[in-house]
Amino acid sequence: MARRTLRRELTLAIVFKVAAIFLLWFWFFSPAQRVHVTPADMAAALAGGPPPR
């Protein structure tokens, strides 16, 4: 009986951690959160000037 309880607790912990990692990725690193940078914007940033608009 103790092995079954341990297995269930470990499974729930792993599922919770995977869900938490996915949510963190979704909120902070998903493609919707990325900033579109053009080569001209990057060149201006490296040169120290304002980005061309």
Image (cartoon, helix red, strand yellow):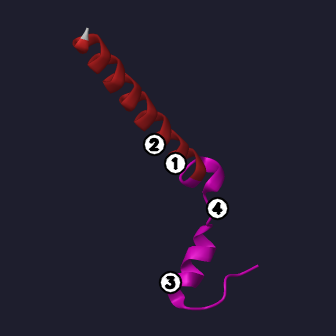
Q: Which mark is residue 24?
A: 1
Looking at the image, do the residues carrying marks 1 and 4 touch, with CB atoms under 8 Å apart? Answer: no
The residue under label 3 is 46
> Against 6, is 42 above or below?
below
Residue nearer the viewer, 20 or 44: 20
Asked whether the residues under the numbered discs 2 and 1 touch, taking CB atoms below 8 Å apart as contact, a structural biologist would say yes
Q: Quadrant of residue 9?
A: top left
Foreground of the two, 34 or 6: 6
Q: Quadrant of the N terminus?
A: top left
Q: Position of residue 51 (x, y in %)?
A: 67, 82
Range drawn in magenta? 28-53
Locate the C terminus by quadrant: bottom right
Question: Please, what is the three-letter code of the amino acid marked with disc 1?
Answer: Leu
Q: Earlier in the sequence, mark 4 or mark 2?
A: 2
**Disc 1 to disc 3, C-alpha distance:** 30 Å
The residue that label 4 is drawn on is 36
Determine the secondary structure under disc 2. Answer: helix
Q: CA distance from mark 1 to mark 4?
A: 21 Å
Q: Position of residue 33 (x, y in %)?
A: 63, 55
Q: Looking at the image, do the residues carrying marks 3 and 4 touch, with CB atoms under 8 Å apart?
A: no
Q: Amino acid at mark 2?
A: Ile
Marks 3 and 4, the one that precedes in the sequence: 4
Q: Mark 2 = which residue?
A: 21
Q: What element does badge 3 sit on?
A: helix
Q: Residue at x 24, y 14 (%)?
A: 2
**Amino acid under label 4?**
His
